[in-house]
Image (cartoon, rainbow, N blue to C red):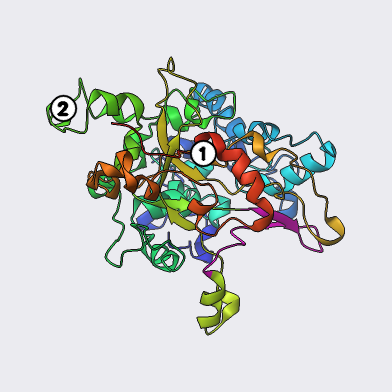
């Protein structure tokens, strides 16, 4: 996304400029309101400080919208774009909050809400999708104060979901993949000089976020109550467009690998995803002034060589790992489970026991006492879809010796050097139930 020019971030067009005619006049139903109807404050004041006093809100939330959009505002208040939802539950599974609970909560609130909640106050930030660029992406109005019924994929959706979703969907991780190759095992299919990533097939077909993620999902309808974001009832399913009962049914049935055994046990992503980004060891800390920051991937095995080769080593940051691993689906509850497939693609999340430990005088270890209680290789649905992928090139990639290149066989070895030594034991304990020690029998 191209950054919004500073002069345009807060320029309120008055409707008299030809190219913006109607933005603040009769062209939009929203513009029949006064500034204070949405923003609060005092429109009779003659100084900026006084005008923005009291109940003023620079980014209006659902309280400014629910008089006309009550159902949407109510639904969105519990949706994943407004709340942190599963984060506290996922941390609680690992014992977070049972040690120094007040300090643990304070560090969570300081570090996590900067990116993983729409407004600092917890109010639904309708404007971040429909009026402006989200603050975490630099802020700024999209088209003056004109409201966009459909958010912009580049300026709204991927402004927040950029590091993984955008780079993967647009096929923009080849430079990262190239740097990773120095760390891959010799047998890795991703180490081959001619291996490259392509854009997601849905992107190539011209689809954008909203073609798969409808407004009801974005507005929080069917949001989960536990730590499983895949429990959102309005999330898209591959079977909505592919398979029996769809326009694709005949072509789908003609694919020999779409056998009943494969379809019953494996997520579509097992055969149709390309490598995707995996992160390790997110460590938060604070500056001397108390401002929170974080860093990830401290064990990146390519970092030293890249710094040594750089003209300015200070500009060289740790890389994530582009990889692909299949394993037992952590969401699968057994043979009677009809909601989840037994095997799924797994993505490593940047969690370890020292996420909130900090350093120096602020160091407080032990805030996450039981990392082994929940996997760090998690069920994933990467936006890297391709019809024919490396794993489908040979049956032996699942049913023979080639499986070691694609399946999670060793949580440490398969991380290609990105796991820091202090966390080896907890990584093994957390992921032991997901690994395969032998190929799947025919």
How dense is the environment of label 2, judged by Cα within 10 Å: few (below 14), some, or many (20 and up)?
some
Q: Who comes first in sequence, dot 2 or dot 1?
A: 2
Is label 1 in a helix, a strand or a loop? strand
- In the drawing, does residue 315 fall left or right of residue 249? right
Confirm whether the magenta stretch covers residue 300: yes
On the question of residue 207 being in view, the answer is no
Q: Residue at x 74, y 54 (%)?
A: 49
On the question of residue 431 being in view, the answer is yes
Q: Quadrant of the C terminus?
A: top left
Decide whether the magenta segment is chiefly helix, strand or loop.
Answer: loop
The disc at residue 253 is: 2
Confirm whether the magenta stretch covers residue 415: no
> Is the residue 194 above or below the residue 52 in the image?
below
How dense is the environment of label 1, judged by Cα within 10 Å: few (below 14), some, or many (20 and up)?
many
For this orientation, the residue located farthest to the bottom is: 311
On the image, the x and y values in percent for residue 233 come to 45, 22
Q: Residue at x 30, y 53 (%)?
A: 199
> Is the residue 316 above or below the residue 168 in the image?
below
On the image, the x and y values in percent for residue 435 come to 49, 39
Is label 2 in a helix, a strand or a loop? helix
Q: Which residues are magenta?
A: 281-302
For this orientation, the residue located farthest to the top is: 336
Q: Which residue is tagged 1? A: 378
Image quarter for residue 182?
Answer: bottom left
């Amino acid at each position: 996304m191209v950054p919004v020019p500073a002069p345009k971030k807060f320029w309120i067009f008055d409707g008299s400029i030809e190219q913006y005619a109607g933005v603040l006049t009769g062209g939009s139903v929203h513009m029949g309101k006064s500034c204070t109807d949405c923003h609060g404050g005092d429109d009779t004041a003659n100084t900026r400080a006084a005008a923005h006093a009291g109940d003023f809100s620079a980014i209006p939330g659902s309280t400014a919208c629910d008089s006309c959009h009550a159902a949407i505002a109510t639904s969105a208040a519990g949706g994943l774009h407004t709340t942190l939802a599963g984060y506290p539950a996922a941390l609680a599974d690992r014992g977070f909050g049972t040690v120094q609970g007040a300090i643990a909560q304070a560090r969570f609130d300081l570090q996590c809400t900067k990116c993983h909640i729409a407004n600092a106050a917890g109010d639904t930030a309708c404007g971040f999708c429909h009026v402006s660029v989200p603050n975490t992406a630099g802020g700024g109005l999209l088209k003056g104060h004109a409201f966009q019924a459909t958010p912009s994929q580049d300026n709204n959706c991927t402004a927040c979901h950029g590091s993984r979703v955008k780079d993967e969907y647009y096929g923009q991780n080849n430079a990262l993949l190239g740097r990773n190759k120095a760390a891959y095992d010799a047998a890795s299919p991703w180490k081959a000089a001619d291996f490259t990533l392509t854009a997601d097939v849905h992107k190539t077909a011209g689809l954008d976020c909203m073609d798969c993620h409808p407004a009801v999902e974005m507005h929080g309808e069917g949001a989960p109550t536990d730590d499983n974001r895949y429990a959102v009832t309005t999330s898209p399913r591959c079977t909505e467009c592919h398979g029996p009962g769809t326009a694709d049914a005949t072509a789908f049935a003609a694919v020999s690998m779409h056998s009943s055994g494969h379809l019953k046990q494996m997520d579509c992503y097992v055969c149709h995803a390309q490598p995707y980004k995996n992160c390790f060891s997110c460590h938060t800390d604070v500056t001397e002034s108390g401002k929170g920051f974080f860093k990830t991937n401290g064990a990146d095995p390519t970092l030293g060589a890249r710094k040594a080769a750089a003209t300015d080593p200070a500009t060289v940051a740790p890389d994530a790992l582009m990889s692909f691993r299949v394993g037992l689906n952590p969401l699968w509850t057994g043979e009677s489970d009809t909601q989840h497939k037994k095997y799924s693609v797994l993505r490593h999340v940047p969690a370890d026991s020292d996420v909130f430990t900090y350093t120096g005088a602020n160091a407080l270890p032990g805030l996450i006492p039981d990392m082994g209680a929940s996997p760090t290789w998690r069920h994933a649905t990467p936006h890297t879809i391709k019809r024919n992928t490396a794993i489908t090139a040979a049956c032996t990639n699942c049913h023979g010796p080639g499986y070691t290149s694609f399946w999670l066989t060793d949580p440490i070895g398969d991380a290609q050097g990105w796991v820091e030594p202090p966390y080896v034991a907890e990584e093994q304990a957390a992921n032991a139930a997901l690994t395969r020690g032998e190929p799947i029998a025919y």
